[in-house]
Image: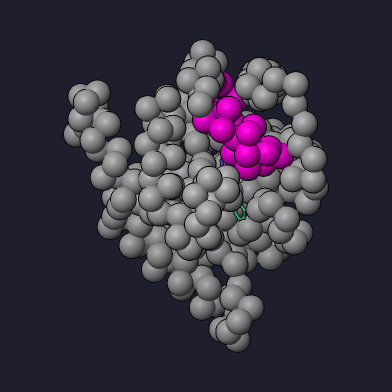
Amino acid sequence: MGIINVTPDSFSDGGLYLSTQRAIAHARDLIDEGADILDIGGESTRPGSQYVNVDEELNRVLPVLEALVDTGIPISIDTSKPEVMKHAIEAGAFMINDVNALRNPGTLEAVAPHKHVQICLMHMQGTPQSMQANPQYIDIVSEVKDFLRQRIHAVNTAGIASNRLVIDPGFGFGKTLQHNLALLNQLNEFTTLGIPILAGLSRKSMLGAITGNNVSQRLHESVAAALLAAVKGARIVRVHDVKASKAALAIYNATQELDK
Ligand code: 7PM
């Protein structure tokens, strides 16, 4: 899964139009690099990010989705808002990636009737504004697993079948470095839930905390983390660097005889 961010560039006066064109061009590059899914986000769910209202988020995300739908590549939309979910599904989204795991009012109803649409349920402790202040767990792996089990049950009860689901422990979302490392080390524990696992580690600060590299220099640690997540059972890795990640995963897949 290749990451596409759509946010207006505050350093140029091109505004949203240029950001949209840049995101579409970047998406085409990631398709050429071999992305199997693209995840498009308007940044409203990012840690510490400013609240983005529905209209603004739609203005960011929909033109990019509409421009890419004809490529045939499955498109995921990173949103927690029911209105954005509805419009994105109408415009052809294949997956809704919700860092709030369909806990916001109206989100279950927005996605439930659309039986062809996949859902990523991610774990987060707290809210994007406050979650990194003082994250606390007694047993990180069992608490995240219990949360995901409860969310799977809640969405099943709302009429969303398990074959539409993907689960994600939410690296960096209300977790210290030690919490993140324990989750990565024990990622295979989540396979017993019987739902495909998605892991997002690309360029995250937990990687920089280990190597000392800043965000623009975390390619090697990101590829290592994606490969490790795959070895420990992740079926989808959410990455910025598609070409390098694909090459690393091809080696693992060859040993598993899964490669095409
Ligand atoms: C600043 C900090 C900007 C963190 C962006 C981020 C995930 C996600 C994100 C994830 C799923 C990033 C994050 N991370 N969705 N959205 N899983 N499902 O690094 O780990 O892209 S935003």
Name which residue lies at 19% across and 34% down.
260
Q: Position of residue 221 (x, y in %)?
A: 43, 47
Q: Position of residue 75 (x, y in %)?
A: 45, 48
Q: Taking 247 as reference, is 83 left or right? A: right
Name which residue lies at 63% across and 48% down.
79
Q: Quadrant of residue 42?
A: bottom right
Query: Observer-nearest residue: 54 or 97?
Result: 97
Whether residue 202 is situated above or below residue 215 in the rendered picture: above
Name which residue lies at 63% across and 22% down.
141
Q: Taking 137 as reference, is 234 left or right? A: left
Whether residue 51 is situated above or below residue 257 in the rendered picture: below
Name which residue lies at 51% across and 26% down.
185
Quadrant assignment for the N terminus = top left
Range of magenta residues: 160-184
Residue 173 colored magenta?
A: yes
Q: Taking 80 as reference, is 185 left or right? A: left
Q: Position of residue 173 (x, y in %)?
A: 67, 41
Query: Observer-nearest residue: 125 or 103?
Result: 125
Q: Quadrant of residue 180?
A: top right
Whether residue 221 is situated above or below residue 234 in the rendered picture: below
Whether residue 157 is situated above or below residue 180 in the rendered picture: above
Q: Position of residue 109 (x, y in %)?
A: 70, 34
Instruction: Using the rendered image of the protein, determine whether residue 24 is visible from the camera's viewpoint.
Output: yes
Query: Observer-nearest residue: 190 or 151?
Result: 190
Which residue occupies the extreme top position in the image? 192
